[in-house]
Amino acid sequence: MTSQNKGVRREVVRLAAARPVTARLVTACLLAAALVGTAPAAAETPTRGDGPVVVPVQTTGPADRRFNLVFMGDGYTAAEMPAFRADLERHLNTLWSIEPFASYRSYINVWAVEAPSAESGVDCDPELDAPTRDTALDMGFWGGCNPDSVRRLLTVDSRKAAALADLVPGASRANRQVVALAHSSTYGGAGGSYATASGGNALSSLITPHEIGHSLGGLQDEYDYYARGVPGEAYSGPEPSSSHHTLMTEGQMRERRAKWWRWLGEESESGGVIGRYEGGLYSTKGVWRPSRHSLMKTLGYSFDQVEREVMVQAISAKVDLVQDHTPNRAPLGADRTVWVDTLHPVGGPLTVTWRLDGRSLPTHGARTVDLRKLRLSPGQHTLTATVTDPTPFVRDPAVRASAALTRTVSWTVDPSLTTERDGTGAAFTGHTPTGSPVGARTVVHADTTHPVDGTPAVRWRLDGRPVATGPNDRDLDLRRLRLTPGTHTLTARLAGGDEELSWTVDARPATSAYELSEPLRTERRPGRPVEYVYDGPFTMRLTARDDQEGAVVSQFRVNGDGWYTYYGWPTDADAPFRFTPGGTVIDDLVYGKLGRSRAVPWDDATPDYGTHTIEYRTIDAAGNVSPARSFRVTLVEP
């Protein structure tokens, strides 16, 4: 669907999130850090006058082998480029705190295309009578200044966005996602072929993952209205094609093995239990979604398991799990080694299964097979290596078996052939970056060269002590080491060589603290969290501190509901969050109802008096999640 304005084509896409929330980011993000230490840096596009320049923000590998997130700003003049970089930093800090982006960050290159605009701001911001502006991408609110649209629908000239994205060397339409940030403090965004978000709104950094959910994953909106403040009508269509909407009952889903039947009854990642909750697709009734909350309904919560599974497949489909392998265009001799190089998810290593003539070999995940040890009989044989992502984020066997999560390479082996020795020496070829601390839940990797007559062994040490890895010595999953809190030193050295890699391991999560408005009284009982008593609204400010550089995202939850990203207050990121018995209505959305939450004015506003438990935690730049701490609040009737 398109609309016309100022003679350009704008892409009209799904509405921005219903209940926007952003993280309150305490320190600066590691924007310049590469995730692969030896990945080639991308060349910047030469700047000519005020023309565009391509800046590599995060490089995890060659662009043609990675999923490329291409960010571009609109309405930022040349003098305002520092503001674009700061806005981008905030959006990325939030993105890396959300699954599955956190676990698959190592699949993603991030690029910034800096294209200065002649004028500051974007069209029809905030209202239709606002002036149009001369900008690089012709972004505009109201669906591109369309009076029949809604203010928060922020569109972009798709042709101009594509032209800028084409400047990124090695990226293509098949392996990239464009995100356009508008130089605006007005809340808005959209998701379609291109995702958009306002850059500087206090709530906007969580718009970006929501809109990428639309653009990359094809996820649909789960909120129950189209126009703010107007309840949607009852759904009257057929069974939705959306993976996370249905007309079926739970029993029907189980019986037909349809939609999210595999997740039913699980504790939802975004709060509550995966089940069947009415409302979605802009309708209040007649259609159901998996969770009461989720990132596609209420920003601040996470993707639930159903949405997360879709996003894992979507991200993985942009890359190839097998990054390189022994050439297989001609038969190989049986007097050599055969190898595969894989990707390295931060959240858990891939598995590699080798088969000879259909029979599994006892390689236990090794990335290399020495054919000399197999004592092959005369005649040709078929060797295969199957690389699979065993992530628990996926339960659908069809998704697991898809090309996104499973790849197979095959070779013909002929023992009558003799392999010419190539003289390749042992050396590291790629690794987790050493310049920034890695978290205690991280998979650290080190890849090596591949001599035809041997396999360079990688020896790992933690604080000087050897660490056993098994046959796959390219990946070290730090989670299984159960590190004690603190800072550790991890090293990798090639057996018999002098080359060594070294990492600082940050196994101490960031700490957090809360500050509340003055209560009626405070009660302290041995063995129980401190309790604060109020007879009306109160405020909560969360702050975080880390002994390492990088952003810290704070989260909280009430009565064990879903973890919710702390962002200050919707109208002021520096103000504390405000709890009230019925919630506060802002721009036809409801924030801060203590107890059972409300998203829209027509949700149940019955005050939840009594005692409530509020937990809080942090996620630091290394991915460490702090243990939850808590306090109690009793709300008494006035």
Image: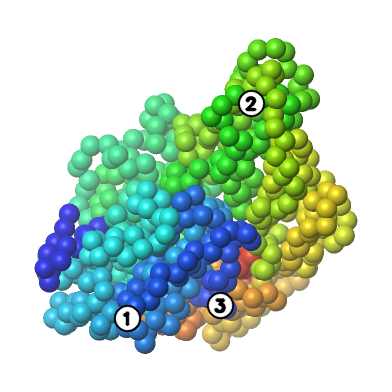
454 relative position to 558: left or right: right
Q: Position of residue 57 (x, y in %)?
A: 50, 68
Q: Position of residue 312 (x, y in %)?
A: 48, 46
Judged from this view, the residue extending furthest toward the top is: 378
Cα–Cα gap, marks 1 and 2: 54 Å
User: Residue 309 or 581: which is nearer the viewer?
Assistant: 309
542 relative position to 404: left or right: right
Residue identifier under label 3: 28
Q: Residue at x 19, y 77 (%)?
A: 124
Residue identifier under label 2: 332
User: Residue 499 or 544: which is nearer the viewer?
Assistant: 499
Amino acid under disc 1: Asp
SS of the residue under disc 1:
loop
Residue 488 visible from this viewpoint: yes
| Placement of the C terminus among the 4 image quadrants | bottom left
Q: Position of residue 388 (x, y in %)?
A: 58, 36
Residue identifier under label 1: 50
Q: Residue at x 66, y 71 (%)?
A: 510
Amino acid under disc 2: Leu
When asked about the image quadrant of residue 632, the answer is bottom right
Q: Position of residue 523 (x, y in %)?
A: 66, 78
